[in-house]
Amino acid sequence: MMTLAINDKQKVLQAIQSGTIDAASISFPTIIDDILLYMNERGILKDLEGSIEDKRTTNKSIPLSTILSLAIAAKMKLKTALTDVPFAISDAQLLSALGVNIYDQDRDILTQGIYEEGVTRNLINKYTAKEFINFYNQYLNESILAKHIDAPTIHIFDCTKIQVNIKNNKYEKSEVVKIDGEAVRGYKLASLRGLLDVSGIIEEIEFGSIKTHDLELSRNLLLNTPHFKSGDILINDRGFISRDIINTLKIDKQVDIYVPAKKNMNIYDVAVSIAKEQDKWSKHPNKKRSNQTIQIVKDLGMYWEGDKEKEDVPINACVVKDIKNDEYYVFLTTDTSKTARQIIQIYELRPEIEEDFRQLKDFWNLEDFKSTKYNFILFHIVATLIGYSYFQIYINTEEGMKYQKKSLPIIIKNYSNKKEKNVVIYKGQYFGIFKFIEFLDLYATCNSEIRLRLAPVLTQV
């Protein structure tokens, strides 16, 4: 059974002086260990425990936050099997910071894992998929966003398809749709992304059938999310077209919407017609779009009516003309103070959420499910998204900024730990963390019995 340890350097020093210690280990952290140490120092890992009910009735010697931290660490280290979770953290300093005693008379946790694989499986079985979604949303809202980072003011909403093996109909609640004539089995993930200084963080999620329309899946999220504040911006894609929700967000929460018009909408036709008539085009602000020009068109709200016409808020548009292909695009906003240039610059932030999904699917194994059970699928997704959030927070720090615009596998491959090595020394339920130079001084002054206990550390350097 894993034993919990207390960080008490003085008691460990006393044990060294009296000639009685249990073991010592040196830390060789990975980039993931560095990130998790950063999160632990700020209380972010501890907050995991208060964001979800501990449904265990027995065997609570392992803190729930430790089990969840291990599961998240496994996802960050690109390991998706539950058998990997007990081994996900092996760095002595991080384990000790989490309160785990690496020395256990009954179990070698470095080779046998902190606990049996069944502990995680039994825990997941106690929760529903909806409870895992609520856990993620509560944790992001009440811990990470409320305590540790400045609340984003620009949000991007999007949905992505989560695909599974088309031939395996055992995936619980999975359904099949056709995309470009090809059958696809899976689910749909709705995400609200908040922009940070660099990159962004997925603030809130909803999950459902791949057949569900984006708007229906996300309606409750968008109308009730706690992340919207007066003056915030919400950017959407063409899949989100609801005049009534736009009205509600603008009137009730003073949130301005940016959304492209579909070509079959009356407001699109009118905006393009007025732009052609005014003929006051200017350069597109994005240098990569040198073949495009833009123009503001105002007072278009009457050309897109909701169920309650009297509540329809004013709408302006930036009309984009593709000169090369003779095509037009219309981007709508409820912020009537913005210029055409400002409208298009804000909307061009939207592809960032598509890049998140690409990273999560291609590099973070978001769709690599080891179980067909619905609650296990949601646990995998939630643990992966929390790990991704930790990564996004870290690269927005001074320490982590060198990893910006790099994918996780490349970072892991090229990681070089230049920090001073630490040695962790254990005595019973206590541990102490010593800088390597401190450890050498201790080794030089202690008796032969203690040296035998400390000697394995020297062989690892």
Image (tube, helix red, strand yellow):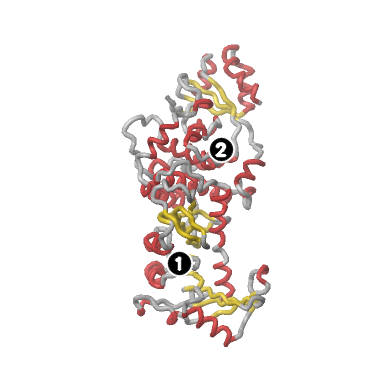
N-terminal of the pair, mark 2 or mark 1, is 2
Tell me if residue 202 comes above or below residue 305 in the rendering: above
The mark found on residue 324 in the picture is none
Callout 2, which amino acid?
A: Asp
Question: Could you tell me which residue is drawn at 52 percent across and 77 percent down?
Answer: 317
On screen, residue 220 versus residue 87, left or right, reads: left
Say if residue 204 shows up in the picture. Answer: no
Callout 1, which amino acid?
A: Phe
Question: Could you tell me which residue is drawn at 60 percent across and 46 percent down?
Answer: 408
The mark found on residue 33 in the picture is 2
Q: Where residue 449 sits: x, y (%)? A: 57, 12
Callout 2: SS: helix
Residue at the far left in the pictured view: 57
Of residues 440 and 230, the one nearer the viewer is 230
Of residues 422 and 15, the one nearer the viewer is 422
Tell me if residue 408 comes above or below residue 219 in the rendering: above
Say if residue 160 shows up in the picture. Answer: yes
The residue wearing badge 1 is: 240
How many numbered circles are shown?
A: 2
